[in-house]
Amino acid sequence: MQTNICHDCGKEIGKGGKYMPYEANGKTFAKCEACHTTDPILRNFQEAEVYSRIVGYIRPIKQWNKAKRQEFQDRLTFAPTVACDC
């Protein structure tokens, strides 16, 4: 039988114990009922690195200066529209 360990507090979840399973990065994680009630979001994962094009080449946003990062935050994104066959 597989034992479940709480992702947040590290305690073993005993047989018949209530827990919330999470699927992330192809793995299954568990949170005990107390930790899930406190914070239902699964945390402690590596932050995704975001790349964008600026001044003709692609760089990670973390390497941009403060003004360019704020400009990126202020950008509006638009969803592509489907052409109408009217």
Image: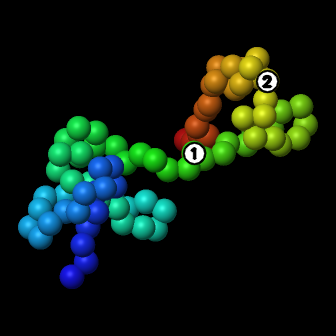
Q: How is the image coloured?
A: rainbow
Q: Quadrant of the C terminus?
A: top right
Q: Secondary structure at mark 2?
A: loop
Residue at 72% x, 35% y is: 62
Is residue 20 shown to the viewer in this render? no
| Residue 9 vs residue 59, the one in the foreground | 9
| Residue 74 vs residue 49, the one in the foreground | 49
Amino acid bearing label 2: Asn
Q: Position of residue 85 (x, y in %)?
A: 57, 46
Task: Pick out the residue farthest to the left.
Answer: 16
Is residue 16 shown to the viewer in this render? yes
Q: Position of residue 21 (x, y in %)?
A: 27, 60
Residue at 23% x, 46% y is: 36
Q: Secondary structure at mark 1?
A: loop
In the image: residue 65, left or right of residue 21: right
Judging by the rendered image, the residue that carries numbered circle 2 is: 65
Numbered tag placed on residue 47 in the rendering: 1
In the rendered structure, are the residues bearing label 1 and label 2 in contact, judged by CB atoms less than 8 Å apart? Answer: no
Amino acid bearing label 1: Glu
Q: Which mark is first along the chain, 2 or 1?
A: 1
